[in-house]
Every structure is written in structure tokens, then in C-alpha cells.
Image (tube, helix red, strand yellow):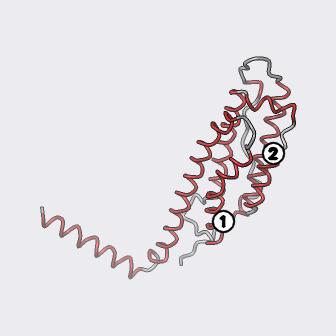
Amino acid sequence: GGFTRKYSLSSKTGTLLPEFPSAQHLVYQGCLSKDKVDTLIMMYKTHCQCILDNAINGNFEEIQHFLLHFWQGMPDHLLPLLENPVIIDIFCVCDSILYKVLTDVLIPATMQEMPESLLADIRNFAKNWEQWVVSSLENLPEALTDKKIPIVRRFVSSLKRQTSFLHLAQIARPALFDQHVVNSMVSDIEKMILSQCSKN
């Protein structure tokens, strides 16, 4: 009902992630190579942009492969960095940035109608995301997983909440465009208020 155009992810094509942290602003413990850190952050930003692009294109299943490829294909010379608390914190900041942009892209800001199939895809993506991340981090330092997972859970929980809300809104929308139904609801609410007032 109404005059709303269905929400489409294609309207978000070309969305770029904002700046990620830079190695020059970090306080290092031990002898971390700034170049290696820069390389790792650049690789991670490219990886995150790839996840975002695939989400925008609706290729949610592909994202699982990118996760596995990135984490399990980590070059040996960068593996020691994955144990460093500063680096782990950087990943977490980057994850938060990615998840914020993903949420903004996947969930329309307005009460725009969303195709049921897209809503189902996003819900499925949210349902699988934690498991995909956990699988991709297998055999990597536990500290990395321990720090990343709470952020993953917040993201998933937020996506699930927002898709549920969208779903409810879409169910309610036709009723709200029907003047007879709206008048009836207003009348019912007025009766409830009056009956509450008369009890007091």
C-alpha cells in the first residue's frame, strides 16, 4: 500500500568505508614493524570493503568465503601480529566501523518497504554471521576471537532487532494506509481512554 518505493540495496552501490585507524597513531608495545601494521590494516580494510560490497550486491553467501580466505590465508610473516593486543584492538575498531556501515546499508533509514526476500536474506546473514566469523578464526590466537566475538554478537543482535522491527512495520503498513482501519483504531483507543478515566 501507499506510495513508497521498495528499498533496494543497489541504491547503496559504491558506498565506501570511512577511514580506518592508521599505524602512525599507535603506541606500540615491543618491536612492531610500522610497515607490517600498515600492510595488515590496509589488507583488513580491503577485506572489509569486499564484505560491504558483497552485502550491497546481495551476495551474502559469498561473504563466508571471503572471511575464510582472509583469516585462514594470512601470510606467515603477519601471523605474529594477530597476537598483539594493540592490533587486536585495531581489528575491533575496524569491525565496529564495518558493522555500523553494514547496518546503515542493509536497513533503510526511513520506513521504506523492503522486499520480503531481501529481509529474509539479511535475517539469514545475521543468523549465520557469528558462526562464519568463528569458523574463519579457527587455529588463530584465542585473544583475537575473544575480542571479536562480543562485537559480532552486538552487530547480529542489532540486525535481528532492526529486521524484526521492519517486518512488523511492513505488516502494519497496509492497515495504516486504510482510513477505515485507522478510524476504527482511533475509536478503540478513545474508548479505552474513556473507560480508564471513568474508573478513576
The residue depicted at 77 percent of the width and 27 percent of the height is 23
Q: The residue under label 1 is which amino acid type?
A: Asp
Q: Secondary structure at mark 1?
A: helix
In this picture, is 14 found above or below 70?
below
- Disc number at residue 105? none
Q: How many marks?
A: 2
- Alpha carbon separation for disc pair 2 and 1: 23 Å
The residue depicted at 52 percent of the width and 57 percent of the height is 161
Image coordinates of residue 171 in percent, x first then y, are: 49, 73
Residue 25 location, quadrant: top right
The residue that label 2 is drawn on is: 70
In this picture, is 199 found above or below 128?
below
Contact flag, marks 2 and 1 (Cβ < 8 Å)? no
Image coordinates of residue 29 in percent, x first then y, are: 72, 18
**Pick the front one: 79 or 36:** 79
Q: The residue under label 2 is which amino acid type?
A: Phe
Disc number lying in front (2 or 1): 2
Badge 2 local density, few (<14 within 10 Å), some, or many (20+)?
some
The residue that label 1 is drawn on is: 121
Residue 62 location, quadrant: bottom right
Image coordinates of residue 133 in percent, x first then y, are: 69, 48
Image coordinates of residue 49 in percent, x first then y, are: 77, 48
Q: Residue extending furthest front?
A: 139
The residue depicted at 69 percent of the width and 32 percent of the height is 88
In this picture, is 191 found above or below 96?
below
The residue depicted at 60 percent of the width and 60 percent of the height is 108
In this picture, is 100 found above or below 187?
above
